[in-house]
Amino acid sequence: MTISNLQKTPTSLFCHSSNPLKVTAFGDSLIYGYGDPVNGGWVEQLRRQWMAAEPSHVIYNLGVRGDTTAQVNQRLEQEFLLRGEIRNKRPDLMILSVGVNDSPRVGKRSGKNMTDYDRFTLEIVNLLDKAQSLCPVIFVGMVPVDESKMPFLDCLHFNHEDQFRYKEFTKLACQMRDIPYLDIFDLWQERGQNWMRDHICNDGLHPNTNGYLALLEDIRNWQPLMQLEHVCV
């Protein structure tokens, strides 16, 4: 399995054998599933669904609450290489979802971003390049926050303007590398403020149980995941 296969022949990428695939999911609380005490988030729900299917794909949740792009970058390769299960084997696919924790203004709405934008662009490029050197990659974008509930923890001013800047650069960097990118930010905003508020926790930052159900549906209806789930059955 090669990166070029993912880019050029995605339909046949995962039909090389009937063996279950090993998938790693790296990122922040959106991967971890924080805010969903019922189902454990979208990665956990996907894991359970795959366990009951044939072939029974494996997905490792490697999300850490609060992680920035630099922090995911630091732990990416070592944690990835430990998930091959069999000696000298590597996981087949990596899902990335990170960036929102780089974007908030610290202390006040006009404060500095948690990660300076120029630094963020370097970190995300480094992360994508490192990830692609390991295996095929797909990217799930950030969820829009509820600005009316900010600041988070009384000090982090998440906002749509900065979220948009950071996700747009990430999206462009993915496109330049032929990495599939699911733009959850735009998709959820198109559904309106009332819909979004019904799907975000009271903290204004994390999806709630219904939010993760919607996120799971969005991801499962995304072509790269649809191809993965229909592998050689």
Image (tube, rainbow, N blue to C red):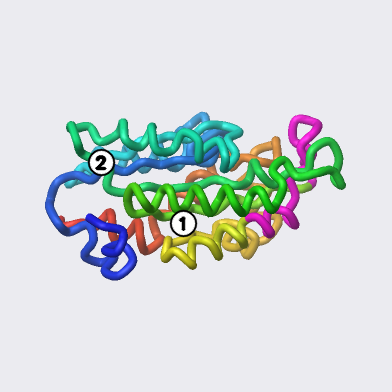
Check if residue 151 falls in the magenta segment. yes
Q: Is residue 217 left or right of 93 when viewed as pictured?
A: right
Residue position marked by numbered label 2 in the rendering? 90
Residue position marked by numbered label 1 in the rendering? 218
Q: Is residue 81 above or below residue 198?
A: above
Q: Which mark is residue 113?
A: none
Q: Is residue 175 above or below residue 213?
A: below
Q: Horizontal and vertical percent for residue 64? A: 52, 32
The residue range painted magenta reads 148-166
What secondary structure is found at the residue carrying circle 1? helix
Q: Is residue 150 left or right of 57 when viewed as pictured?
A: right
- Residue drawn where x is 55% and y is 65% of the image: 172
Q: Earlier in the sequence, mark 1 or mark 2?
A: 2
- Residue drawn where x is 42% and y is 61% of the image: 179
Q: CA distance from mark 1 to mark 2?
A: 27 Å
Q: Mark 2, residues whose alpha carbon is within 10 Å: few (<14), some, or many (≥20)?
A: some
Q: Is residue 109 left or right of 27 when viewed as pictured?
A: right
Farthest residue to the bottom: give it: 8
Q: Mark 1 against mark 2, which lies toward the viewer?
A: 2
- Residue drawn where x is 36% and y is 51% of the image: 133
Q: Horizontal and vertical percent for residue 4? A: 29, 64
The three-letter amino acid code for the residue at tag 2 is Arg
User: Front-most of 82 and 161?
Assistant: 82
What secondary structure is found at the residue carrying circle 2? loop
The quadrant where residue 151 appears: top right
- Residue drawn where x is 19% and y is 44% of the image: 20
Q: Are dots 1 and 2 in contact, CB under 8 Å?
A: no
The quadrant where residue 25 appears: top left
The quadrant where residue 183 appears: bottom right
Q: Is residue 105 left or right of 63 when viewed as pictured?
A: right
Split into 4 quadrants, where in the image is the C terminus?
bottom left
Check if residue 149 falls in the magenta segment. yes
